[in-house]
Image (cartoon, rainbow, N blue to C red):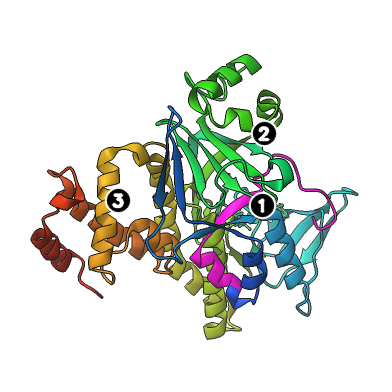
Amino acid sequence: MRTAPAGAGRSINMAMSTRGIHALKQVGLDEEIMAMAIPLAGRTIHLVEGDLSFQPYGQKEEEVIYSVSRAELNKALITAAEKYEGVRFHFNERCTGVALRTGVVYVRDERTDHTRSIPLQQLIGTDGSASAVRTALLSAGRFDISQQYLDHGYKELTIPPGPGGTFMLAPNTLHIWPRGLYMLIALPNPDGSFTCTLFFPHEGEYSFSSLSTPEKVLDFFSHQFSDAVPLIPNLAEAFFANPTGNLVTVKCFPWHYQNSILLMGDAAHAIVPFFGQGMNCGFEDCTLLDECIEQYGPDWERIFEVFGKLRKENVDAIADMALTNYIEMRDRVTDPAFLLQAQAGLLLEQRYPDLFIPKYSMVSFHRLPYAEALRRADIQESILQQLCASITSVEEIDWPSADRLIKERLIKD
Ligand SMILES: Cc1cc2nc3c(=O)[nH]c(=O)nc-3n(C[C@H](O)[C@H](O)[C@H](O)COP(=O)(O)OP(=O)(O)OC[C@H]3O[C@@H](n4cnc5c(N)ncnc54)[C@H](O)[C@@H]3O)c2cc1C
């Protein structure tokens, strides 16, 4: 990928936050990656009528997420990894299977179609959400696996840079066009362009299958995303040329086989992208694996086992939070009750900074285990619901009740 042009239709940027940045720091790559990242301080909401509003992600200056180029990040990681002694990359080679008991991995050269078998000592399967290594673990027996496809898929579109590489929308923000059952989002790239992603039902009245002609696409976009339409050249052509992606949550366990195989990243736990955490979570896997190796090396079976035990409930928690966040992003961000609770949450954080941290901040700006973030977020949500149930503005918050609820329910560990 360092020599070939980037593939069309692949997500070309993604949101990176504290967990990912921490892992990069551990391998001395944070400064290089951050130098090409664009900070995003919040969400800009585009209403149907064209009005804009801004919702900050956090309330401290450093509470921003970063838009990074998927390709540049991958290239930097490959270049850094190959500097380590013993690391070799074999491109265009596909794992087609693993014989668990004999300890052999089969790899097909996609240019020659030749398959070779490689004896393995430790194999770490990071081959993504459709992992071939994971498929091999099925034959180990007592391997739990579930996959849940969303009824919604996604399609990427591009807003090119303006004259002289200028941004055609405000750059330091994630743009969202929330429309209840679906949404369009846009993230900036360093060259002044934006990658837009339409998250949309596969079937139904407004869906990938119903937008079947260029006229229907243009009519739909003009009504729903009118301010984006002039910014996306050849919209209808791009809509039909770019692939429609699926969104899947994969849960499986155990992630290891004896002392020889471990799954990590999307291969172990693919999640939907609505919390911007899939990659961050995969990087956090690396942080934990590193700790396990430090503590138990070279006992690989113990390393793999402890890694899975410590990590599983946390990735299940972010998988669930990512699903819930789709509804928040596409629908709740324009709901007055949600906005009131969000404002109240920021005030509670100011008043009890060690006890009350909004869910988005716990996930994106802290390294609190995801399961703990989910547990605390559920308690916080019920406190907010109680405090906001009969008020219409944050000035009316009953602070003595807030003090009592926080002390009763969110005792500092
Ligand atoms: C639309 C979308 C937007 C997203 N946005 C974000 C975001 O903003 N922030 C975020 O943190 N996460 C985001 N994610 C999630 C993120 O892309 C994934 O969590 C992350 O890429 C997982 O990394 P991985 O290395 O585990 O797997 P992958 O990135 O899928 O990499 C797997 C690698 O294995 C290779 N491979 C696959 N099969 C084989 C095989 N059989 N043999 C050999 N090699 C193989 C692939 O070519 C690839 O190089 C998004 C995902 C999607 C779909």
Between 168 and 236, the one lying in front of the other is 168
The residue that label 2 is drawn on is 243
**Element under disc 1:** helix
The answer to whether mark 1 is within 8 Å of ligand 1 is yes
- Name the amino acid type tagged 1: Ala
| Quadrant of the image occupied by residue 290 | bottom right
Question: Relative to 402, is 198 above or below?
Answer: above
Q: Quadrant of the N terminus?
A: bottom right
Question: Was residue 3 drawn as part of the magenta stretch in this picture?
Answer: yes
- Residue shown at 82% from the left, 62% from the top: 90
102 relative to 24 in the view: left or right? right
Number of numbered discs visible in the structure rendering:
3
- Residue shown at 61% from the left, 84% from the top: 298
Residue 182 in the image: x percent, y percent? 46, 32
Q: Nearer the viewer, mark 1 or mark 3?
A: 3
| Quadrant of the image occupied by residue 211 | top right
Marks 1/3: CA–CA distance: 42 Å
The residue that label 1 is drawn on is 132
- Name the amino acid type tagged 3: Ala
Q: Earlier in the sequence, mark 3 or mark 2?
A: 2
Instruction: Return the residue found at the far right.
Output: 112
206 relative to 119 in the view: left or right? left
Question: Which region is colored magenta?
Answer: 1-24
| Quadrant of the image occupied by residue 61 | bottom left
Residue 342 badge: 3
The answer to whether mark 3 is within 8 Å of ligand 1 is no
- Name the amino acid type tagged 2: Pro
Instruction: Return the residue found at the far front.
Output: 164
**Element under disc 2:** loop
**Badge 1: few (under 14), some or many (20 or more) residues near its Cα, within 10 Å?**
some
Question: Relative to 152, is 204 above or below?
Answer: above
Between 394 and 110, the one lying in front of the other is 394
